[in-house]
Image (cartoon, rainbow, N blue to C red):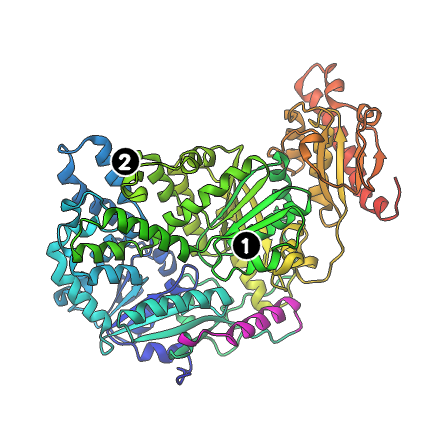
Amino acid sequence: MKQRVSDFQSFVQAAPRFLFFTGKGGVGKTTLSCATAVALADSGRRVLLISTDPASNLSEVLGTELASVPRQLAEVPMLWALDIDPEVAARAYRERVVAPYRGTLPPAMVASIEEQLSGACTTEIAAFNEFSRFLGQPEATEDYDHIVFDTAPTGHTLRLLQLPAAWNTFLNTNTSGTSCLGPLAGLQAQHALYAKTLECMADATRTQVALVSRPERTALAEAERSRGELGALGLKNIRLLLNGLFDAGDEDPVARAMATRQRTALAHVPAGLQSLPRTDIPLLAFNVTGLAALRAVVNPPASANGMVPSAVTRSPELWPTLCVLLSEIEAQGRGVILTMGKGGVGKTTVAAAIAVELAARGHRVHLTTTDPAAHVVQAVGGSVPNLSVSCIDPAVETAAYAKESMTAAGADLDAEGRKLLEEDLRSPCTEEIAVFRAFAAKVNMGQEGFVVLDTAPTGHTLLLLDATEAYHREVLRKQSDLPEAVRQLLPRLRDPEFSKVLIVTLPEATPVHEAAQLQEDLQRAGIKPYAWIINQSLTPLELRHALLRARQDNERRFIEEARQLASHFAVVPWLVHEPTGVEGLRQLSKLSLDAGARATGQEKKMKPKVLFLCTGNSCRSQMAEGWARALKSDALEAYSAGIEKHGLNARAVRVMAEAGVDISGHTSKTVAGLGPMHFDYVVTVCGHANEHCPLFPGKAKIVHVGFDDPPQLAKAARTEEEALTHYRRVRDEIRAFVDTLPACLSKGKS
């Protein structure tokens, strides 16, 4: 490995005129670009900071409201910053492309073209068009010593701009069309400017590309892919910024495990990244917002804990967990579960954990993943009864789709047109569609059991399906038949009874903001996400390390932000042992509200499954399940059902909410509707259920407990408040019983 720069301060001091920060979401690009810009300005240099991140929080980090024109910071007079909104740029861009067709093409076809130009590729190229003048037009930056870019364009965009065919009238002369090439067709006049921009980016004397990553296995793999793309384009002036290095330094088991996991990841850094010069940045204890925090990134205090707030010992916070979410989802007994989210948030692991746990509970499950390493397939394939696993290889699917497309759409193109089409077929949109076609064949299986889809299609792809002409142009590429599986897929994904979309994110600014964008995109396609899952959170853990406790405090605002956006919600704690293998994956789904002990490896005993049974599963059994999940989920797994299905009792929901327990998301269900589940205990909470208790196979013990029936008592009430009094009394009696239940079960009483 080349000689490393000793610290971030040295990196800043050696900065050339142009600095590009690139990397996947959530690795710290905005933090490091802002810290660099402030430090350069503090040294007396005139600096322009530019962001084109769709989920930009530049204004938040700098503490100054920004716009699309440079704005001088009052407290840092040598620093100007601007925040280009890519969505605004893309809307203006689409209008310039589509305007010539209005009045000449049918409205439906114009709408189809507009949707084709609503994808990520169009947004990225539109943003690149906005800031290219800062590199390609010297007069635009002559007043500044340094120009710092937060979020560089991807390799795909740069390759497109290098192709001569990108500057012809491809969209106007070829009827096949494409989502990525559309905007380029209107940019012939920009050719010289873009050429100068690319030349500047490749000039190591003027430009430095800072590739930001974290010392984690998946993040380093993503960084290696980006390095390969940029290197293939001739960009050799790349430096790796390894953000978030952590030295435990004490006996906190979570801290030790975190440091060990980082060391393991760094021992297997991809060869391409090892060839890069590297700058290491330590894990920060504080939330990097405001100028004081930004300056501390470059010039950390002498004490390692100089920016760490006073540690306050507190109990872990109780948030809904994946265990609670799964109990709600599995009640239907079948359907499709889709995990969505940006790269690096853990959606593949969450999908695998859900599939493994549902299979372990007796459901028939099929898991489909696009994990390139296929480690999930290796971990669970053939290991769990009721579970089948398949791996969709994006490279194989994209190659097959590209071959079909070239045959259908490329036959009448000249050499330049074919080359441009080939590049378009290498875009993220193309891979997404190719994988999407493969997913479509799996969804039909949701009629017979559960299908768990990892890395599901985005809202943009789903919207393409909603316009027949757009789908014909973008996906089928002149093929005549629309596959029935694809035809039925979008209606099924829009059916909340059949499909459950789970958005996976991390308790950090960029991942949460990107997840919010994903939710908007899905809702635009007519799909309402079922739940958000906050992954790898420190909030549920009991910590001793001061730095980690400070980070735990910083998570709260983002967890709360996500909770406000979510219909259902779960928090998955950071685990000492990586969730690999069947038992490792089951850690995620079996963690209770009090997750600290399990997450730190201090508790490994399997919890008993307890079914609360009542006649109609409307009131008493629902309250018992709610109390058990809220108070005793560290000791048991709670479910409820009825001999019949009467629907959820509104008064029961109300009085439980008064006590701080939300059961409004529960569904009324019968024993038969639970499917082939095994229970360790069945607790009947009304006399009628006792008399008609069904036979449960296996070793389930029956516990008979009789509580008064609140609806019957309420019939004699003269006022609503008097009726609610009966519900509150039974609610409190059930709580007292649930408090004693784990102890009774552990002693074998029934």
To which quarter of the image does residue 383 belong? bottom right
Secondary structure found at label 2? helix
Query: Would residue 522 be found to the left or right of residue 467 on screen?
Result: right
Amino acid type indicated by mark 2: Glu
- Relative image position of residue 448 (x, y in whole percent): 58, 36
Of the 4 image quadrants, the one containing the N terminus is bottom left
The circle drawn on residue 483 is none
The quarter holding residue 5 reads bottom left
Q: Is residue 187 above or below residue 652?
A: below
At label 1, which amino acid type do we have? Asn
Residue 572: x and y, percent? 59, 53
- Front-most of 329 and 133? 329
**Residue matched to label 2:** 469
Q: Residue at x 13, y 57 (%)?
A: 190
> What is the spatial separation of the Cα atoms under label 2 and label 1, in whole angstroms?
39 Å
User: Residue visible at 67% across and 51% down?
Assistant: 590
**Prevalent SS, magenta region:** helix
Q: Secondary structure at mark 1?
A: strand
Q: Answer whether residue 386 is visible to the viewer in this image.
A: yes
Q: Is residue 264 magenta?
A: yes
In the image, which residues are magenta? 251-272
Residue 369: image location, x then y, percent: 50, 52
